[in-house]
Amino acid sequence: MVSYIWAFLIGIGIIYSLISGNINVLNESILTNANEALDLILNLLPTIVLWTGILKIAEESGLLAKFANLLSPILEKLFPDVPKNNKALGYISSNIAANMLGLGSAATPAGLKAMNELQKINPQKDTATTPMITFLILNTAGVTLIPTTILALRVAYKSVTPGEIILPAIIATTCSSIAGLTLDYFIRKRKKNGNNI
C-alpha cells in the first residue's frame, strides 16, 4: 500500500512539473537529491553498523539474556498470556534493548521473531492476540535512552549540539510508552469484563 502512495506522489510531482514548465527543476532535484541521499546513507551507515555490532556482541555474550531476565518480572506482567519461558519474551527483550539504543533497524529482526513466536501460540491465526497488540504498542512507543539514528542524522547535517536531543527524546518516549501501555491496560481490562469497545 505504501509503495502505491509513494508512486502516486511521485507521479503527481512529475505531472505538476511538466504542466507548470519546471522540468529543469525536476531534473536538477533528481540529481542533487540522489547525491544527498547517498551521502546521508554513507554518514549513517557507520553508526548503525557499530551499534548493530555491539548488539550482536551483547547477544552472543549472553548480555541480552541477562537483560531479558532483568526485564522478566515486567514482561510477565505486560504479557500474562505468554508462557514464562517462551522464546517470544527473549526476542521482545532484544527488541526493547535495540529500541532503547535508538536502533530501529537493529530492533526489526528481533521484533519480527517475537511476532513469529507470538503467532505460534495464537489460537486464531487470522486475528492479533492481546500480547501481539501490547508488543506492537511497546515497540512503537518504546523508551529510547540513546536516539542513535537521530544523533547520527544531526551529526551528518552539522548540528552544533547534536546531543541536545537526548533528554527530550527520553521524556517523549517515556510519556508515549506510559500512555500507550495505560490505554492498552484499560482496553484489556474492559475486554476481560465483557464490554465491547
Image (tube, rainbow, N blue to C red):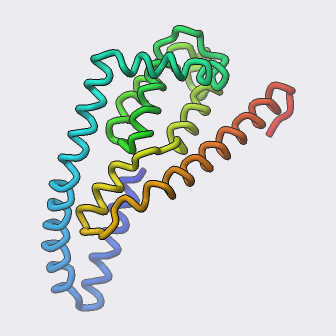
Tell me where residue 124 appears, x and y as whole percent.
61, 19
Q: Is residue 46 left or right of residue 4?
A: left
- Residue 17 is situated, as x and y percent measured from the top left of the image, at 27, 83
Q: Is 63 left or right of 138, judged from the image as shown?
A: left
Which residue is painted at 31% across and 24% down in the image? 58
Q: Nearer the viewer, residue 16 or 186?
A: 186
Q: Residue at x 45, y 18 (%)?
A: 90
The residue closer to the viewer here, 53 or 197, is 53
Q: Quadrant of residue 10?
A: bottom left
Q: Is residue 32 above or below residue 67?
A: below
Of 166 and 183, nearer the camera is 166
Outermost bottom residue? 21
Left of 126 or right of it: where is 18?
left
Q: Residue at x 82, y 33 (%)?
A: 190
As displayed, is residue 101 above or below residue 121? below
Compared to residue 35, the image places residue 104 above or below, namely: above
Indicate the position of residue 178 as horizontal and vertical percent values.
65, 43
Quadrant of residue 177 within the rendered picture? top right
Q: Residue at x 36, y 20 (%)?
A: 63
